[in-house]
Image (cartoon, rainbow, N blue to C red):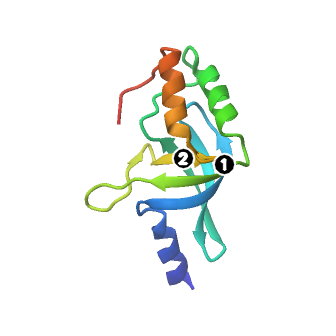
């Protein structure tokens, strides 16, 4: 049984699309989600939205960015999560968060946040 669970847990590390549920929106570019692995097995992981560079919460407009992401991606939203991997097949992570594209209602939340941040002339941190 442990072997099967380990294999299923590794499946989230591989690039691919997974169903999930948003559990928390931490800031303007990080969410926590329950990710479905199949066979009624899921994991909880933090996801860093690919190419979204919002100010940190403690920085100017950081809270505004969090609230905007909450508007686009409410807690308990059912989403599709596409994780990314390196050419060697290992998951791309930053600060222990999986880098991912999150879609909700058929729309890329990443693209919507990038557009909003550009309109507001906001950015934070360096690119990945």
Relative image position of residue 103 (x, y in whole percent) = 56, 47
Report the residue at 36% width, 27% height from top. 126
Residue 22's disc is 1
Q: Is residue 111 visible?
A: yes
Location of the C terminus by quadrant is top left
Relative image position of residue 54 (x, y in whole percent) = 50, 26
Location of the N terminus by quadrant is bottom right
Mark 2 and mark 1: Cα distance apart in space: 10 Å
Report the residue at 26% width, 61% height from top. 88
Q: Earlier in the sequence, mark 2 or mark 1?
A: 1
Q: Which residue is mark 2?
A: 102
Vertical placement of 43 versus 102: above or below?
below
Relative image position of residue 74 (x, y in whole percent) = 71, 40
Q: Residue most toward the front?
A: 106
Query: Element type at marker 2?
Result: strand
Q: Is residue 55 left or right of residue 85?
A: right
């Amino acid at each position: 049984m442990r072997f099967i669970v380990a294999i299923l847990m590794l499946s989230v590390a591989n690039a691919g699309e997974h169903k999930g549920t948003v559990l928390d929106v931490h800031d303007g570019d990080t969410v926590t989600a329950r990710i479905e692995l199949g066979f009624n097995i899921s994991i909880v992981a933090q996801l860093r939205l690919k190419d979204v560079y919002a100010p940190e919460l403690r920085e100017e407009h950081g809270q505004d960015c969090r609230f905007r992401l909450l508007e686009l991606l409410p807690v308990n939203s059912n989403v599709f999560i596409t994780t990314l991997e390196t050419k060697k097949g290992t998951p791309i992570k930053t600060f222990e968060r999986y880098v991912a594209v999150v879609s909700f209602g058929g729309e890329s939340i990443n693209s919507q946040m990038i557009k909003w941040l550009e309109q507001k002339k906001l950015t934070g941190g360096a690119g990945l």
